[in-house]
Image (cartoon, helix red, strand yellow):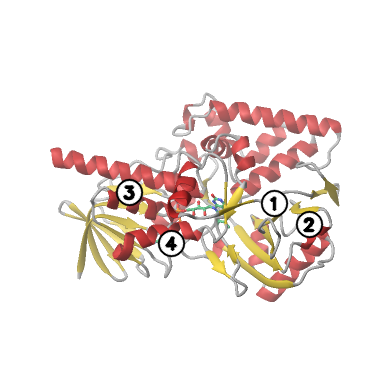
Amino acid sequence: MTTHADVLIVGAGLSGLYAARILRRAGLTVAVLEARDRIGGRVLSQRLSNGTTIDLGGQWIGPGQTRVYALAKEYGLKTIVSHTQGDNIFLADGKYQRTTDTVPPMSVPGKLDTLKLGWQLDRLIKQIAVVDPCQHQRAKQLDKQSFREWLQQNASSKEARAFWLHVAEEDLCASADRFSPLEWLQQLATMGGLEGLEKSGHEFFADGAQNLAQCMASELGDCIHTNTPVQALRRHGQFVQVITARGEFLGKRVILALPPQLIESISFDDSLTNRPVNKPKDRILGQVTKTLIVYDHAWWRDKGLSGVASTPTELISTLVDSSDFDGKPGILAAFSSGQRAVELSLMDDETRYKAVLSYVENVLGKASGQLTDIVSIDWTSEKWSQGGYASRRAIGGWSEPEHTLTSPFNGIHFAGAETATEWRSFMEGALQSGERASEEVLNALSAEVVA
Ligand SMILES: Cc1cc2nc3c(=O)[nH]c(=O)nc-3n(C[C@H](O)[C@H](O)[C@H](O)COP(=O)(O)OP(=O)(O)OC[C@H]3O[C@@H](n4cnc5c(N)ncnc54)[C@H](O)[C@@H]3O)c2cc1C
């Protein structure tokens, strides 16, 4: 059986659902084809037996993320401001150090050098054109070296180097040997610079970020087809034919709302691919494992601790308080990124949870609250994500001819957080990319009608 719709959207993550919502509201018929048995993609919320909701994927939002806030308002979704009061813990000089500061304890020259590098990065970010960073006069140079090499050349102290290495690696979930300064600078430029990054953890959804997807899906109704992995795309007269494990679909236009590396698993017939589709070899897959540790209350707050720990060389690289303001229950979110995420994912559940709990005890002290749940997810082994938070261009990737990832061809359009020019790699970026792709489709279809 063949199903017809004006527009076929591959992927029911935030980008695909948002695109579908816009197109439906514009009066078009859509079919959203989703490989998983659920919607949301990299947003995944889980309700625990005590009624608390935890987010295993995308969670935090902050100022400037206008589309996410507008959706939350429209659907009446409650947000919670992150609790940040208390001392932070940093691993510095091989010791856990407690401080009221948001940067690790450093020597005065180290602190000055850290500030200087921050200004240098900010200056570069302001000069970067988000759509085409290759226009920057030093783009080639900034794209051909690794961020680690750039730091070696630009930081004069070990402390500043270690600080910025950790910030960049945590933001991109990848080793600084594998991405270029340009890759990070462009992402920062899409989010209003380092200030945007700093504020991006401002708040989160009381009932989980997946609710954003769920609300859009309720509005879209039965045009969403789950358990429908797309296998191939073919030209069929003036239509594009999409072949899935559960039947065929015909549409005037297709939006691929997927992480770019997953596009490679879809086969395109020759009439469609008159240009190279982005190859996974051009991409670094972000590696992240997120563990949520739930206690009856946020016991670390009783000790004057914020629950934030920054420990770059440990199995867990970042720990944050993810609980409500009253701290009941108390929830810690533990992130492992890059190689450490791989190490953690190779452990069986029991060993992994033991390692995470022993880390928490080492950095925050003995828990004085009752542990009620511990849940972990390795996004790298998720077949339909292949990594998190997002995938990246490898060193030199911006200098490739198809570096924008977004230009439509033969009725095929591209969405997905990786293609965003605002808040790239974030939930807001996913929405912005869905908006851009749906506008492209609307313009193309109205031009066809005129013709
Ligand atoms: C651990 C983690 C933490 C994060 N934290 C934050 C945060 O705090 N704040 C923030 O803003 N962002 C965060 N993010 C990023 C954010 O979640 C993503 O940017 C956003 O959800 C991506 O949406 P998307 O629609 O672009 O892609 P996806 O969510 O990946 O959607 C793509 C969809 O396509 C489907 N699919 C794949 N292949 C096929 C196929 N062949 N056929 C059919 N369907 C297919 C997938 O199953 C998926 O549902 C985080 C991500 C992770 C993993």
| Separation (CA) of disc 2 from disc 3 | 43 Å
Residue, x 59% and y 28% (percent of image)?
Answer: 124
Circle 3 sits on which residue?
22
Q: Do the residues labelled 2 and 3 touch (CB within 8 Å)?
A: no
* Residue 97 in sight: yes
Where is residue 413? Give x, y as percent: 32, 47
What is the quadrant of residue 39 in the picture?
bottom left
Cβ of mark 4 under 8 A from ligand 1? no
What is the quadrant of residue 375 in the picture?
bottom right
Residue, x 58% and y 39% (percent of image)?
Answer: 184
Circle 2 sits on which residue?
301
* Residue 277 in sight: no
Q: For the residue marked with disc 3, what is the amino acid?
A: Ile
Query: Of callouts 2 and 1, which one flags the residue occurring earlier in the amino acid sequence?
Result: 1
Q: Is residue 61 left or right of residue 448?
A: right
| Separation (CA) of disc 2 from disc 1 | 10 Å
Determine the secondary structure under disc 3. Answer: helix
Residue, x 45% and y 43% (percent of image)?
Answer: 420
Query: Of callouts 3 and 4, which one flags the residue occurring earlier in the amino acid sequence?
Result: 3
Vertically, is 416 above or below 181? below
Vertically, is 407 above or below 138? below
Please rate how many residues cluster around mark 2, counting C-alpha atoms within 10 Å: few if below 14, some from 14 to 19, many from 20.
some
- The tag on residue 83 is 1
| Separation (CA) of disc 1 from disc 4 | 26 Å
Determine the secondary structure under disc 1. Answer: loop
Circle 4 sits on which residue?
214
Please rate how many residues cluster around mark 4, counting C-alpha atoms within 10 Å: few if below 14, some from 14 to 19, many from 20.
some
Q: Which of marks 1 and 3 is in front?
A: 1
Q: For the residue marked with disc 1, what is the amino acid?
A: His
